[in-house]
Image (cartoon, helix red, strand yellow):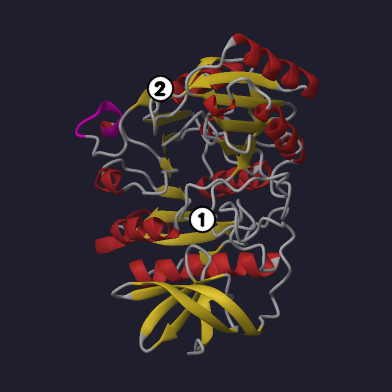
Amino acid sequence: MKPPLLEVSGLSHDGRGVARRDGKTVFIAGALPGEQVRCRVTRARARFDEAQLLEVLRASPQRRAPPCPHFGHCGGCTLQHLSDGAQLAAHQQQLAGALERIAGLQPGQWLEPVASDPFGYRARARLAVAWDAGARRVALGFRRGASRVVEPLDSCPVLAPAAGALIAPLAALIATLAAPGQVHELWLATGEPGLALGVACAPALDAPDRARLEAFAAAQGAVLHFGVIAAHGEEPQWTEAGPPLRYATAVDGPVLEFQPWHFTQANRGVNRALIAAVLAQLAPGAGDHVLELFCGLGNFTLPLATRAARVTGVEGDAGLLDWARRNARINGLANTEFVAADLAVAPAGAAWARARYDLVLLDPPRNGAAALLPALARLGARRIAYVSCDAATLARDAAVLCARGAWSLTHAGVFDMFPQTAHFESLAVFDRLAVRARER
């Protein structure tokens, strides 16, 4: 029986085409809005089906040939077949749709969307390594979608060129090691300037293999780090740390030091635009005390400290806090304070949560900041800026903040941090309604 024709009406949050068949939603990998397609259902669920694209009978005018030969296999990119402008528009629609559908909200003003260089923007990557002992072949790359299989890459167009150029020679080198199966991950990171390579192993490599990797890194001008994975599923323990990399938060802004395994935004240009937007929206004054939740190693904290009287950064990772303090010292910003706290739970009377603040910034992980929202009402802040990498959890938290007329969503916008993927960063700004009433 010939597969039926389906009309694709939209994109899902993960970049798949959305269609309807017999009253049921169908998610079609590789299909685009406005297209007429044939597909084959690969998984039927109670409320929706998942399908494989078989044929495009009417193509979207925004469809293009993916520039990477690994597209469709590698799990790193999902939207290379969609034009860059259409990707940005789709992200805007997803943010607006999530706010409307989940929270019943529209911002008072949409911020101008921030686009990115479409390729060569990714300053860091964590690559998987798979060793085929029978074929004596190394697969080095990202895992295929919804799979543990590693797609072997020769290059990657979204990686910074200096990092991408290491992929093929590293795969060839690992295949010649005495114990190639002990290398499980490679961490690549670029600085401004600088290049670093982290090699995560289980167990640790012997001296001859280490020496070969050291010689390779030296020839490439890269700082080399070795890490050991103690047990399956655990993060590597980096037992040796070379000199850190650096990046600037603005042309004349604070400069932050970091190691390849630290969380930093992968897109330096869009990160700077996001920092500038946060500063513009919060507009801290010389007398303001700012609270930043999920501060990391100081990406927003230090730029805020150049304008505010005082900034308190709270973070759950004690190691990152050490680097945040280090970065504050390097930049001569003594008006910062850093506090370690588990932000996945309510603060329960913590000293930082009993203080008063003029402004608040949140930059939580993908699961949002639900546990912290009740405490925000007690801090006395006049404005909240919320940076999010997940539109759905942002909308969920926005609904709580705006419930019972406590806060108003004044601004929202999209920052295209990860072109060629379904991921993007958002910024939402909330004003305390009592403050707005007084200002009028």
* Residue of label 2: 230
Please state if 413 lies on the left or on the right of 321 as rendered: right
Q: Where is residue 278 in the image (x, y as percent from the top left)?
A: 54, 46
Of helix, strand and loop, which one carries label 1? loop
Q: In the rendered view, would you say 176 is above or below 367? A: above
What residue appears at the point 58 percent right and 22 percent down from the top-left corner?
A: 179
Give the amino acid type for the residue marked by disc 2 in the picture.
Ala
Q: Does the magenta stretch include residue 252?
A: no
Please state if 222 lies on the left or on the right of 321 as rendered: right
Q: Position of residue 18 (x, y in %)?
A: 48, 76
Residue that sits furthest to the right in the current view: 219
Q: Which label was assigned to residue 145?
A: 1
Please state if 163 lies on the left or on the right of 349 as rendered: right
Res 437 seen here: no
Q: In the rendered view, would you say 240 is above or below 379? A: above
Q: Position of residue 338 (x, y in %)?
A: 42, 24
Q: What residue range appears in magenta?
A: 348-353
Badge 1 or badge 2: first in the primary sequence: 1
Residue 165: which quarter of the image? Answer: top right
